[in-house]
């Protein structure tokens, strides 16, 4: 199958403005993921070295369950509401409340207060991601390059937050999110009625429903689970200095970003073959050399925009649900790191 499932060659006019809006979504992705991890670290740091009434692991597990496993539901909602900007506004409100509540949760030291913060963070994160995934398709169609750019930035946001988390950093990120989200909504409101899914209305994308559609999306989700496991294998263990953490995050971002362009150039089948062969070679060497690890990590992340592109193709007009299903499929990879 070539990339020529023609999502961006269907005669739909796509302006530079659409790609500019995708750029804003991508920066917001970097900031939102960074804020969530920064807030979670600040929330739990005072209690990591002392006995407390709650388990820090449970805090992170709760956050990830809400952030990942609720996305099919929030994606389903995103596909059905016409005013998509309310998803972004809701995400920003929930994340802001989480940040404001964090100092009080720390001072109280009680489990309910801690879990209140992570619940706000998790649901806010979930709302943002399905909003962003839906927006990309609404603005530029199922462009595999744009999908790669949007999904890429979160990985580097997590790495930067891991290294630089602080109260100052947290508040700066929150302010940046509020300003950028406000700018996006104000820019987008005049065009809201025009922003139905480009993929949904393309004659080149007949809906793939029924049994075969379900099998296809299940197969894509299974591959995402496999990818999350492989990515975890390349990411865990060894040196975890700040430089290595940033290198891992940057490589993951670069891989997701490059994957869309490589697939556009080679076609999906050829791109997948090249990517998976290189990943297999890196795994078979068994080397923990940083260059080999980063190469394998880069190549496995290159497949991310491909899976999202295919999921959108299988579920045209339901890109929020497609994004949510694939996000939920990432959860097994996280569980392996516990």
Image (tube, rainbow, N blue to C red):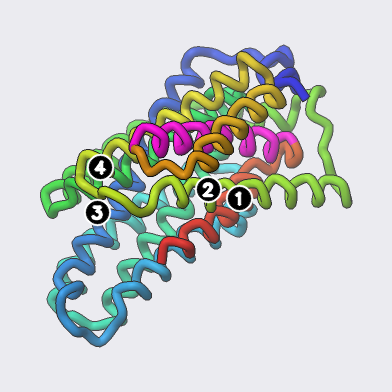
- CA gap, disc 4 and disc 1: 26 Å
Give how far apart the Cα atoms at labels 1 and 3 are.
28 Å
Gap between marks 4 and 2 measured at Cα: 22 Å
Q: Position of residue 2 (x, y in %)?
A: 74, 20
The residue drawn where x is 42% and y is 61% is: 337
Taking depth in this image into account, of 278 and 47 the one nearest to the observer is: 278
Residue bounds of the magenta highlight: 290-313
Left or right of 146 on screen, residue 235? left
Query: Of callouts 4 and 2, which one flags the residue occurring earlier in the amino acid sequence?
Result: 4
Q: Position of residue 180 (x, y in %)?
A: 31, 35
Label 1, on which residue? 226
Q: Which residue is mark 4?
A: 160
Q: Secondary structure at mark 2?
A: helix
Residue 81 placement (x, y as % from top left): 61, 48
Q: At numbered mark 3, what does the secondary structure look like: helix, strand or loop?
A: helix
Q: Circle 4 sits in a helix, a strand or a loop, which is it?
A: helix
Callout in the foreground (4, 2): 2
Q: Residues within 10 Å of mark 1 (few under 14, many from 20)?
A: some
In the image, which is nearer the foreground, mark 1 or mark 3? 1
Residue 294 part of the magenta-drawn span: yes
Q: Determine the residue positioned at 38% across, 53% down.
A: 236
Work out how far the residue at label 3 is from the one at label 2, CA to CA, in angstroms: 25 Å
Numbered circles on residues, count: 4
Q: Report the disc number at residue 230.
A: 2
Left or right: residue 261 versus residue 33 is: right
Compared to residue 162, the image places residue 201 above or below, namely: above
On residue 38, the disc is 3
Mark 4–mark 3 distance (CA, rounded to whole Å): 9 Å
Q: Are discs 2 and 1 less than 8 Å apart at CB?
A: yes
Residue 239, label in figure: none
């Amino acid at each position: 199958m070539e990339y020529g499932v023609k999502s961006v060659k269907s005669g739909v006019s796509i302006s530079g403005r659409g790609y500019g809006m995708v750029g804003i979504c991508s920066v917001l992705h970097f900031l939102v993921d960074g804020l969530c991890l920064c807030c979670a670290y600040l929330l739990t740091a005072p209690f990591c070295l002392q006995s407390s009434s709650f388990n820090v692991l449970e805090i992170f597990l709760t956050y990830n369950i809400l952030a990942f496993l609720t996305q099919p539901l929030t994606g389903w909602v995103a596909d059905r509401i016409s005013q998509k900007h309310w998803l972004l506004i809701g995400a920003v409100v929930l994340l802001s409340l989480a940040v404001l509540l964090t100092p009080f949760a720390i001072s109280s030291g009680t489990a309910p207060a801690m879990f209140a913060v992570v619940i706000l963070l998790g649901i806010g994160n979930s709302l943002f991601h399905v909003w962003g995934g839906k927006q990309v398709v609404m603005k530029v169609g199922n462009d595999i390059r744009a999908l790669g750019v949007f999904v890429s930035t979160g990985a580097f946001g997590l790495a930067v937050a891991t290294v630089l988390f602080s109260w100052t950093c947290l508040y700066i990120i929150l302010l940046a999110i509020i300003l950028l989200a406000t700018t996006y909504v104000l820019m987008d409101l005049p065009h809201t009625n025009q922003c139905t899914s480009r993929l949904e209305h393309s004659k080149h994308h007949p809906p793939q429903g029924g049994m075969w559609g379900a099998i296809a999306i299940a197969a894509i989700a299974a591959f995402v689970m496999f990818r999350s496991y492989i990515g975890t294998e390349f990411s865990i263990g060894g040196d975890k200095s700040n430089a290595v953490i940033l290198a891992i995050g940057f490589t993951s971002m670069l891989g997701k970003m490059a994957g869309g362009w490589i697939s556009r150039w080679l076609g999906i089948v050829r791109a997948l073959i090249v990517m998976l062969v290189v990943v297999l070679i890196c795994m078979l060497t068994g080397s923990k050399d940083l260059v080999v690890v980063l190469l394998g990590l880069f190549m496995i992340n290159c497949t991310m925009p491909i899976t999202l592109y295919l999921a959108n193709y299988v579920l045209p007009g339901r890109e929020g649900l497609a994004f949510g299903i694939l996000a939920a499929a990432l959860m097994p990879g996280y569980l392996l790191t516990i």
